[in-house]
Image (cartoon, rainbow, N blue to C red):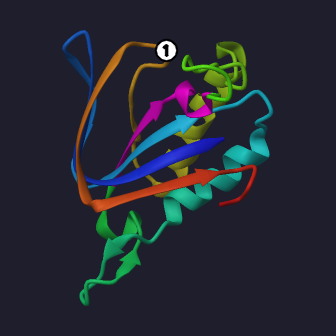
């Protein structure tokens, strides 16, 4: 799994001009799922996201987590995080998991993050043409890959 985590002051997902998910302070998480991903990847990544300390403390240092600031998550499925650009100029997506594998893992990630943070997770619509807007705070953007544990 790959995640792009952006610290935001607000983020919104629209599908067909309807708001499907919206948050104020928290994380916009773009989540890519590949064919090789398993429940172990999901568990590790969910813990990282929930406990990541990138919010400022009283001294302005990044020491606070989502729970510390009562932050929220807007989770968006993003198969293009597994784009291969080795050949030509048109990306290939063969490493991205097919919907029959990706959808159950995406839904489990929603449940896991919700349990870890004890709150509802806002989401996009899997496979839809989504319009995402955000105000990146900092900017702070973190990339995580479960295969490299970075």
Please, is residue 114 above or below residue 66 in the view? above
Query: 94 above or below 84?
Result: above
Residue at position x 78%, y 38% in the image:
38
Of 2 and 125, nearer the camera is 2
Q: Residue furthest front?
A: 88
Disc 1 designates what residue?
127
Q: Is residue 22 left or right of residue 96?
A: left
Direction from residue 121 to residue 143 in the image, left or right: right
Furthest residue to the bottom?
Answer: 59
**Nearer to us in this view, 101 or 2:** 2
**In the visual, does 35 lie left or right of 47?**
right
Task: Residue 116 in the image: state x and y as whole percent.
Answer: 54, 55
Name the quadrant of the N terminus.
top right
Pinpoint residue 124: horizontal percent, then vertical percent: 39, 26
Q: Which image quadrant for residue 74?
A: top left
Residue shown at 68%/44% (left/top)?
A: 42
- Secondary structure category for the residue under label 1: loop
Residue 54 within the magenta-colored segment of the rendering: no
Q: Nearer the viewer, residue 2 or 117?
A: 2
Does 73 appear above or below 52?
A: above
Could you tell me which residue is drawn at 64 percent across and 15 percent down? 99
Which residue is drawn at the image coordinates 65% and 61% (left, top)?
Answer: 150
Which segment did they paint magenta?
72-83
Task: Estimate how packed mark 1 is, as few (under 14), some (14 to 19) or many (20 or more) residues with alpha carbons within 10 Å.
Answer: few
Q: From the viewer's perspective, is residue 40 above or below residue 125?
A: below
Provide residue 80's location: percent of width, then percent of height.
54, 27
């Amino acid at each position: 799994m790959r995640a792009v985590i952006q610290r935001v002051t607000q983020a919104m997902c629209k599908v067909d001009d309807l708001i499907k998910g919206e948050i104020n302070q928290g994380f916009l998480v773009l989540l890519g799922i590949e064919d090789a991903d398993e429940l172990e990847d999901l568990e590790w990544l969910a813990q990282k996201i929930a406990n990541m300390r990138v919010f400022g403390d009283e001294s302005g240092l990044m020491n606070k987590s989502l729970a510390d600031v009562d932050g929220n998550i807007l989770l968006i499925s993003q198969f293009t995080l597994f784009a291969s650009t080795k050949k030509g100029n048109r990306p290939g997506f063969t490493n991205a998991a097919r919907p029959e594998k990706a959808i159950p893992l995406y839904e489990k990630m929603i449940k896991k993050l919700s349990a870890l943070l004890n709150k509802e997770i806002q989401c996009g619509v899997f496979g839809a043409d989504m319009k995402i807007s955000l105000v990146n705070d900092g900017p702070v953007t973190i990339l995580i890959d479960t295969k490299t544990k970075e």
